[in-house]
Image (spheres, rainbow, N blue to C red):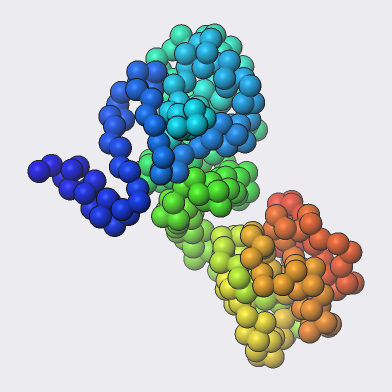
Amino acid sequence: MSSECCLFQRIAKIHPGIKVIPYDPYLPISCRKPTFVTTMNFFSISDIENLTGIRAHTLRIWEQRYKLLNPKRKESKHRQYDNEDLKYILRIAFLYHSGYKISKIAGFSEEEIKKMALDTTSGKENYQVFVNQLTEASIDFDQSRYEKILHNLILHLGFEKTVTQILFPLLNKIGLLWMTDKVSPAQEHFASALVIKKILVAIDGVDKPPGNEGQRKVLLFAPEGEHHEIPLLFMQYLLKRNGVYFVYVGKNAHLDAIKDFCVQHNPTQLYCHLVTNLLSTDLNEYLKKISSVFPDKEIVFSGPQARKLDVMPSNIRVLKDAEAMLSFCNK
């Protein structure tokens, strides 16, 4: 019995509700036979629209006029796209946004489209191609390719620009896919772990400033319920590089733990970053509470949730973008 058959049997045993449908990944998408899918998680055409920036109406036209796509169908006849479809459409979308006419793209083979998407750059300030490349590598668990892309980006763009312009958008995209059950937690963790490794190496390469009395001292944490720590690790790097002393409490930090650290280290500022909003209380209420617990501290807050805040107490400072984060780190 082949290892592939054994794998399918193990999957079926562990997840009896999943119908495993093997297919040949090397067969061009235009030649794949559409399959009825009832239990697997696939992308809807709305998901594809949100992830590629190509309107659903346009995708349907491309399918009908140029035969570029051949999505599977649910029993309800609604279109369903798998991981291979997503990667293929991401490549087409990038070429289309880079100025190629769809009629010309339709004339290329799938392999030619892949090569062009990997080789094409549409201007030094357009980083979407790299976000797409890293997304593909994450979906495929291709560590070698992921690390090669990341290494080259850091070499040519520098570490900070790679993180703010490419890795943060990448993790937001992967997070969106995970939140909508379009990728597995393992795929999200795969992408995050490789980014964390790079940031930890960068942090270790910078000398930590001495913690002299009377100087600025920042306490870094993510609130209880927040398990994303990449932005906090990046902030560690920025503070070390700028000679600012800090103490790192970590992710999912309970308020009592923050109190204990404040007693021992007496920081001048508290910094927290929130990616998701999984707190047990309303975010505005949480920040008002922490403001009242530490009235003598400046509390600095950043993250995607920062744009949703109401008027805050006077000791709350909100950083709404990467530039504000970089400015905060200046000594």
Q: Is residue 11 above or below residue 47?
A: below
Pick the residue in front: 294 or 285: 285
**In the image, 303: left or right of 19?**
right
Pick the residue in front: 106 or 237: 106
Q: Is residue 169 above or below residue 225?
A: above
Q: Is residue 60 above or below residue 272?
A: above
Q: Is residue 252 visible?
A: yes
**In the image, 224: left or right of 70?**
right
- For the point 47% across and 36% down, the residue is 133
Q: Quadrant of the C terminus?
A: bottom right
Outermost residue on the front side: it is 76
- For the point 57% across and 71% down, the residue is 251
**In the image, 107: left or right of 216?**
left
Residue 34: horizontal and vertical position, in percent? 38, 25
Image-quadrant location for residue 329 = bottom right
Residue 27: horizontal and vertical position, in percent? 31, 23
- For the point 34% across and 22% down, the residue is 33
